[in-house]
Image (cartoon, rainbow, N blue to C red):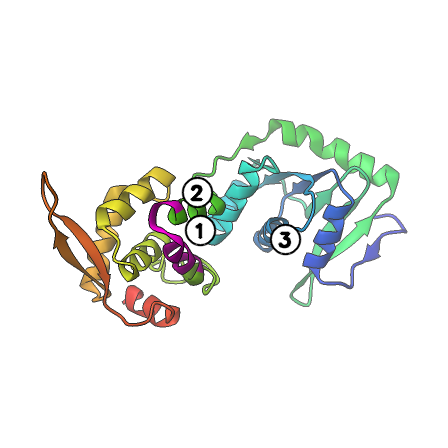
Amino acid sequence: MSADATVMDQEFADMIDSFFEDADTVLIVNPAPNVFQTVMLTAASFDGDLPHMQVLADPDVLKASLDDFILASQVSDLIDQDSLELRTTGDIARSSLLVSDDEVVTVITLDGELTGLRSADGDLVENVQSTFSDDWEDGDVYSLRTPPLSRIQETLSEDFGDDVEEDFMMVVESVDTIPGEDDELDEVAIALLVAANNEVLLYDISKWGEDTGVASKATFSRTKTRLEDRGLIDTEKVPIDVGRPRLRLILVPDDLGDVEGLASQVSG
């Protein structure tokens, strides 16, 4: 690291925000899980024109990080906006780096907190870019199946009304990760609880889930049965002109906003 490298005293997320302001493209090399999460969430909330981001990561890091629906849906938004590309490689035993056309940030952890060593040394930047450009070209494209969060919000509002979309986001924003520690209060369970709070038909919310890519109708059906068994939702039959009656979902608990209580009951 060159002599003009400086230790960033500001919060790591603020440093990333500042880094984005000055960059047209950013290559993110070998991010640790907490680095990947911080960079992606900072990008998702960035107020301005994002640089084009290229992430070259260990496949296990991406797989584990993107198991969280909240993070994955926002990353999917960035991909959908053509602001982000994800690639993987198994041979990348180096520190986490952020590289723009003009700067390099080496990410380290001090006292349990992320810190960036930032340098604008021209020779260093050129050397790092040269080193990792071939690695990027040789990396494997990582495909993310989680739908963008903006699409989920838009389709919930269009198909079921603003109340359903607002309920869904209220629950999502009340938890840190989805699924949580017990892997039970996932996006399908949340969608069903929200649908039940608004007395939506099981057929309609399941079709929505499959059409948007959240999960299959079979997954919605299995999760509905589990929530019924836990006493969280009930159903009533709604006759239709042709075929078997549809099932209307009904929320048993009084307060959808008691997310902690719901999560505890869902987890059993």
**At which x and y percent is residue 242?**
9, 38
What residue is at 32 percent from the left and 40 percent from the top?
210
Q: Is residue 228 left or right of residue 97?
A: left
User: In this figure, which residue is indicated by the disc labeled 1?
Assistant: 69
Please tell me how crowded label 1 is: few (under 14), some (14-19), or many (20+) other residues with Cα within 10 Å. Answer: many
Amino acid type, mark 3: Thr
What's the distance in space between the residues labelled 2 and 1, CA to CA?
Answer: 7 Å
Please tell me how crowded label 2 is: few (under 14), some (14-19), or many (20+) other residues with Cα within 10 Å. Answer: many
Label drawn at residue 42: 3
User: In this figure, which residue is indicated by the disc labeled 2?
Assistant: 146
Q: Which residues are magenta?
A: 158-169
Q: Is residue 58 left or right of residue 145?
A: right
Q: Is residue 68 visible?
A: no
- Marks 3 and 2, the one that precedes in the sequence: 3
- Marks 2 and 1, the one that precedes in the sequence: 1
Question: Which element is circle 3 on?
Answer: helix
Please tell me how crowded label 3 is: few (under 14), some (14-19), or many (20+) other residues with Cα within 10 Å. Answer: some
Label 1 near label 2: C-beta < 8 Å? yes
What's the distance in space between the residues labelled 3 and 2, CA to CA?
Answer: 19 Å
* Residue 212 higher or lower than 195, as above or below: above
Amino acid type, mark 2: Thr
What's the distance in space between the residues labelled 3 and 1, CA to CA?
Answer: 16 Å
